[in-house]
Image (cartoon, rainbow, N blue to C red):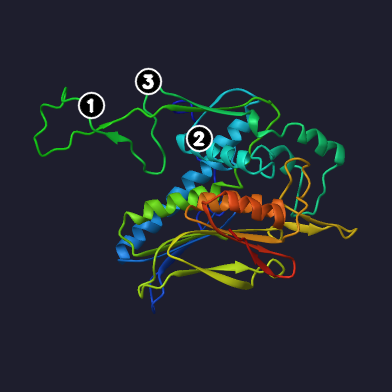
Amino acid sequence: MTNGIDNQLDPIPSEEFCEVRAAANGKPAGVRFLAFNTVVDVEAYGEADACTAAFDEARALCRTYERLFSRTLPHSDIARLNAAAGEVVEIDPLTFDVLQAGLRYCAESEGAFDITVGPAVRLWNFHEGTVPDADELARAMSHVNWRGLKLWKDEEAESARQCPGGVSHLQEPSSREGADSLSEDETPLRGTVPPACFAQLEDPAAAVDVGGIAKGWIADALLAAMEVRGLSGIIVNLGGNVAVSGTKPDGSPWRVGIRNPQVPEQLIGAVPLTRGSAVTSGTYERCFTAPDGTFYHHILDPRTGMPADTDVAGVTVICEKSLDAEGFSTTLLALGLEHGCALVERHPEIAQAFFIDGHGTITPARR
């Protein structure tokens, strides 16, 4: 334990897998590894050494983020919060930021998104095709309420917290006191004391799951970390959550595909991007058909614990920030075409949204 936060390194599945590809024939350098229960692909144009350093940093950051945000790794902030039975838990500032963002999307989703739906999520097994018992699901749903998650910071924290991910907090001293020994051309910097961050689930049986927003937050963080290395073009793909910065060497934009909900390996469209993110949520991502022919998908309605009753099979959302693209993609899918289009009109941070029905027909949201 350090400053109240458990820093044990839980093993991550297939953590050692890593494939690096050098730039060749006009194609960017790239790295592929596994994290967050998905395949992560990062590509970039730039000097070879800069690309290598950026890829190493991206992989290390993903390890840090997974060990903070995972619902299943036992020493993560999220797992400790869920296991605390209503007690206060100190969390990393990065986890605080993710949870705070999650609460914002809960408030803006009109009831279609709730990061405390964890008790219901755990009853479903989409790999084995298991439908929860109705009474057990009803009991779990009584503990779903995002308003019961409380977050706060202690601005009077006495000890500095070291933020993971290579982020340091520095500032100039407010006065020359203690800095007289510095030469005029030196920059007088000192470490600040970041406030301690805390979280509490008021319901001891409640549980949070940031799976609906974490990859968006992570994609933004990876782009920010890599951009400072002078790369001319970057694309990050976290299992369908795509964020880009810059262009290809010829100045052309990246083209981000829109998947066919009926045949996910096929693309039915593409969006050009030079800065921003495209995130697709689809009922096809985790689903099964029961013996009675009923189709079940993983986008749960936080009011019922059952798959959301929606008339669309997929939604692709384009935003400047990947966090926004992911946060709204799940919500728009759950709301369906009519209510989803109405929400798009109220949120200027959504640059574009494309609704795809079960036949592959694309309907763009109109502003």
Circle 3 packing at 10 Å, graded few (<14), some (14-19), many (20+), is few
Question: Mark 1 against mark 2, which lies toward the viewer?
Answer: 1
Of 203 and 363, which appears nearest the observer?
A: 363
The residue labelled by disc 2 is 96
In the rendered structure, which amino acid carries the disc numbered 1? Answer: Ser
Circle 1 packing at 10 Å, graded few (<14), some (14-19), many (20+), is few
Q: CA distance from mark 1 to mark 2?
A: 27 Å
Per the rendering, the mark at residue 158 is 3
The residue labelled by disc 1 is 174
Circle 2 packing at 10 Å, graded few (<14), some (14-19), many (20+), is many
Per the rendering, the mark at residue 185 is none
Toward the bottom, the furthest residue is: 25
Name the quadrant of the C terminus.
bottom right
Under tag 2, what secondary structure?
helix
Name which residue lies at 32% across and 54% down.
Answer: 228
Hey, which quadrant is residue 167 in on the image? Answer: top left
Name which residue lies at 46% across and 69% down.
Answer: 254
Q: Which label's residue is closer to the chain start, 3 or 1? A: 3
x, y percent for residue 174: 23, 26
Q: Which label's residue is closer to the chain start, 1 or 2? A: 2
In the rendered structure, which amino acid carries the disc numbered 3? Answer: Glu
